């Protein structure tokens, strides 16, 4: 029955490791939440390649220069949920730091406010 | 082929033994009779030869003594007394020779009971002779009484002959002996006539009683003469008569004198003197004696010839019987051996079929080879008889068996095809479902939704694994395939993901080595079965640890559980199953996973061993041969495939 002898090669075969297996089925990460815009930066921590999964290693490499979560997610080609959990795991291990961007209102510092106040007084 | 512990060879011998024993018995009887007859002929001839010559000589002397006694009694005178005493001396001189002959060892050893009795009587008669002689010398007897007493003494000697003749088994020989006896009796009668007439002529007187006695003697002689003439064979009669030739004139003269005596002529009217009479009677007696001896010798020679022929018969029949016996035994042995050889051939063929041919054919048929029934069960060549028929019946059995095996294998293949087709279809659908899930997981932002998708993904992955298992069981390669090496850690995690309790399994990434693409799907399946087994065998609160290590002899993946372990027997049994997966048995579906693992391991030359783990559970070690392993160095050098990460990220 040749019609049934369907074979799926390489890319067609799909990922060797199903995404849920990369996170042990977890969909929520520990620690403070972060979003796509958060910046991931590798710390000076020493990573042991023998104890880290390949995805962890590749994200760690991408985070050598501060990179946003969104960039990392698009580079590793994994579902975002999975990327977030792996990054959170790396943070737990102290291998990366994740910094969320300051929201617009918060970025206005006291100096600016004081300058604004002084300006208003000057009117 | 054996029943009641008796072999066919023995049975054949048994069958042959009965007629053989009968034949041997009959032949022994016939042979013994013939031999007895022949030895009797020999013995009789020997005995007659040994006894007749001295007896005849003695009788001759005794007859002469009788004549002298009768003459002396008729006419007592010194001359006649002297003649009588001389005759006694002559007789006595012959007596020791007779006794010696009758009592000799040869005679005693060959005589029959009747002959022994006759010889005893003869010897006893000899003892009485002295008494008779005393009576004659003292003239206590009339001539006629003395004559009669002598007659009795003499008659005892030839009586031996009829007894001897009767003991001869050969009828012709016996008859000739009787004829001889009659001839001797005729001569004796003549001798008696001679004695009486000599006395009458010497005494010149003849009583009526004397005449009557003479008549009786003449009658006896006539009767005996007729007897021997009728009993002798023509040859023997011719021999006898030949000795009598030239005596016809004397015979006529004797008949004339005898006629005159019987006619009642007084002694003086007989026209014969004593010397004249003696000239007639003496030569006649001598001629008869010679004739008797000639006839006896001729007869003895004849008897010896007959006995020789009898011995020849014994020898011929004996050797024929022996040859027949040997021939029968040889034939029985050869026939028995032939039958047994052919039966052994049949037995060997049956054993070869059961132990070799049939399993071989079955194995080949199961491997999917085309099998020619006629070529696999060539007919046995064992002849056309009953054994040949058994062989042909056996051929039919073999052909049926091989055909049944082929049919069964065909049915199996058909079922296989059905299973494979069904499995392939579900595999195809599941594959599409997984692709869809991939897309949905990428789009999911809500952890809740992702959680559900992950569960769905896991279930689908497990279903895919089962479908793949069926495909592998049907002998086909699993549906998925990779052309470039896949990192070992991904292979291991891929396998773990297919297991129900995957969250309990911790994977130690370890080595950076990769697995050759073509075997990836198989190894994933194999590992999944082992991990599944490990999670099933250990309590839910324990973890299962999977680690990999690059070795000189390949790549080892260890699956360790923290369960209670297994008994050494069970481990040995499972190891045996993994090393030599038995023919698939649908009834044994509990061990299906391990069976599939064993089959995959064998297909890719992978070694799987279960052993007790130091933690108490079971540790399964999968040793992948080096030719399937791509090391980190080779990968870095851009060896047979893309860099390790490429696969995982794809």
Image (spheres, coloured by chain):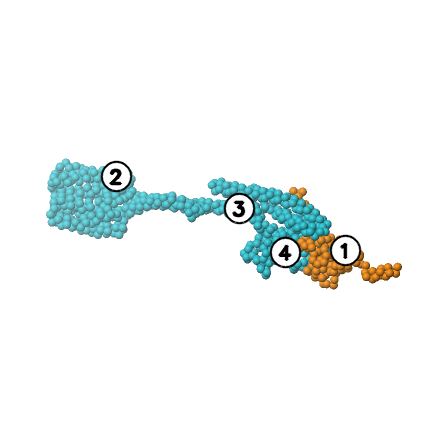
Chain letter of the residue beneath label 3 in the structure image = B
Q: Which of marks 3 and 1 is in front?
A: 1
Residue at image position (17%, 43%) is: B192
Q: Mark 1 points at which residue?
A: A37
Cα distance in 3D space between marks 2 and 1:
163 Å
Specify the colour of chain B: cyan
Instruction: Name which quarter of the figure residue B167 lies in.
Output: top left
Query: Which lettered chain is shown in orange?
Result: A
- Using the rendered image of the protein, determine whether residue B632 is visible from the camera's viewpoint: no
Q: N-terminal of the two: label 2 or label 3?
A: 2
Instruction: Assign a secondary structure to mark 3.
Output: helix
Q: How far apart are marks 2 and 3 (CA)?
A: 84 Å
Chain letter for mark 4, please.
Answer: B
Number of other residues with Cα within 10 Å of mark 1, as a class: few under 14, some 14 to 19, many 20 or more: some
Q: In this view, does B351 lie to the left or right of B549?
A: left
Task: Measure how far apart labels 1 and 4 are at the Cα level.
Answer: 33 Å
Numbered circle sitting on residue B504 = 4
Q: Regarding mark 1 in the picture, which secondary structure is present there?
A: loop
Residue B429, position as x, y percentages in the image? 67, 45
């Amino acid at each position: 029955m040749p019609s049934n002898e369907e074979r799926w090669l390489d890319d067609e075969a799909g990922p060797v490791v199903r995404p849920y297996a990369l996170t042990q089925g977890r969909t929520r990460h520990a620690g403070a939440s972060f979003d796509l815009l958060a910046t991931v930066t590798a710390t000076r921590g020493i990573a042991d390649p023998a104890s880290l999964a390949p995805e962890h290693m590749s994200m760690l490499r991408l985070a050598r220069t501060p990179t946003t979560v969104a960039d990392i997610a698009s580079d590793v080609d994994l579902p975002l949920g999975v990327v977030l959990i792996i990054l959170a795991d790396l943070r737990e291990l102290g291998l990366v730091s994740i910094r969320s961007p300051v929201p617009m209102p918060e970025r206005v510092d006291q100096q600016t406010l004081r300058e604004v106040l002084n300006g208003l007084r000057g009117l | 082929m054996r029943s009641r512990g008796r072999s066919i060879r023995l049975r054949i011998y048994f069958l042959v033994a009965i007629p053989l024993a009968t034949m041997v018995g009959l032949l022994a009887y016939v042979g013994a009779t013939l031999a007895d007859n022949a030895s009797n002929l020999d013995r009789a001839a020997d005995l007659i030869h040994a006894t007749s010559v001295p007896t005849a000589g003695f009788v001759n002397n005794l007859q002469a003594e009788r004549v002298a006694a009768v003459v002396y009694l008729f006419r007592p005178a010194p001359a006649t007394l002297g003649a009588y005493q001389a005759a006694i001396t002559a007789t006595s001189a012959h007596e020791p020779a007779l006794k010696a002959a009758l009592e000799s060892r040869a005679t005693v050893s060959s005589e029959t009971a009747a002959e022994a009795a006759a010889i005893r009587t003869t010897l006893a008669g000899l003892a009485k002779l002295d008494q008779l002689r005393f009576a004659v010398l003292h003239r206590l007897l009339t001539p006629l009484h003395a004559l009669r007493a002598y007659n009795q003494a003499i008659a005892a000697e030839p009586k031996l002959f009829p007894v001897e003749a009767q003991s001869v088994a050969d009828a012709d020989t016996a008859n000739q002996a009787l004829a001889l006896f009659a001839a001797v009796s005729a001569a004796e009668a003549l001798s008696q006539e001679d004695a009486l007439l000599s006395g009458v002529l010497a005494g010149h007187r003849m009583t009526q009683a004397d005449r009557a006695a003479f008549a009786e003697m003449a009658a006896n002689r006539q009767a005996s003469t007729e007897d021997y003439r009728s009993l002798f064979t023509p040859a023997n009669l011719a021999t006898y008569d030949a000795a009598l030739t030239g005596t016809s004139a004397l015979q006529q003269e004797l008949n004339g004198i005898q006629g005159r005596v019987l006619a009642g002529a007084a002694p003086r009217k007989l026209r014969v003197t004593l010397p004249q009479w003696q000239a007639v009677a003496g030569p006649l007696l001598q001629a008869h004696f010679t004739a008797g001896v000639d006839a006896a010798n001729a007869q003895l020679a004849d008897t010896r010839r007959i006995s020789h022929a009898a011995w020849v018969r014994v020898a011929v029949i004996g050797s024929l019987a022996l040859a027949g016996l040997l021939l029968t035994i040889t034939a029985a042995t050869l026939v028995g051996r032939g039958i047994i050889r052919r039966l052994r051939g049949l037995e060997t063929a049956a054993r070869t079929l059961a132990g070799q041919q049939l399993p071989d054919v079955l194995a080949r048929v199961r491997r999917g080879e085309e099998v020619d029934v006629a070529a696999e069960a060539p007919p046995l060549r064992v002849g056309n008889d009953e054994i040949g028929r058994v062989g042909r019946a056996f051929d039919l059995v073999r052909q049926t068996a091989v055909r049944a095996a082929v049919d069964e294998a065909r049915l199996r293949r058909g079922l296989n095809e059905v299973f494979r087709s069904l499995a392939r279809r579900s595999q195809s659908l599941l594959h599409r479902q997984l692709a869809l899930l991939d897309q949905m997981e990428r789009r999911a932002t809500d952890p809740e939704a992702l959680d559900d998708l992950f569960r769905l993904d896991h279930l689908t992955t497990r279903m895919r694994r089962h479908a793949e298992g069926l495909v592998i069981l049907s002998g086909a390669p699993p549906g998925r395939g990779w052309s470039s090496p896949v990192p070992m850690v991904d292979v291991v995690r891929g396998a773990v993901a297919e297991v129900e309790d995957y969250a309990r399994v911790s994977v130690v990434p370890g080595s950076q080595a990769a697995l050759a693409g073509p075997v990836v799907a198989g190894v994933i399946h194999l590992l999944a079965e082992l991990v599944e087994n490990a999670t099933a065998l250990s309590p839910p609160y324990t973890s299962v640890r999977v680690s990999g290590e690059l070795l000189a002899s390949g790549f080892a993946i260890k699956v360790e559980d923290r369960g209670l372990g297994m008994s050494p027997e069970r481990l040995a049994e499972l190891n045996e199953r993994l090393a030599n997966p038995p023919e698939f048995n649908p009834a044994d579906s509990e061990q299906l996973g391990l069976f599939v693992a064993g089959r995959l391991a064998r297909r890719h030359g992978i070694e799987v061993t279960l052993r007790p783990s130091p933690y108490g559970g079971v540790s399964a070690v999968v040793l992948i041969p080096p030719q399937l392993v791509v090391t980190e160095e080779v990968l870095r050098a851009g060896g047979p495939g893309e860099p390790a990460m490429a696969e995982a990220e794809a």
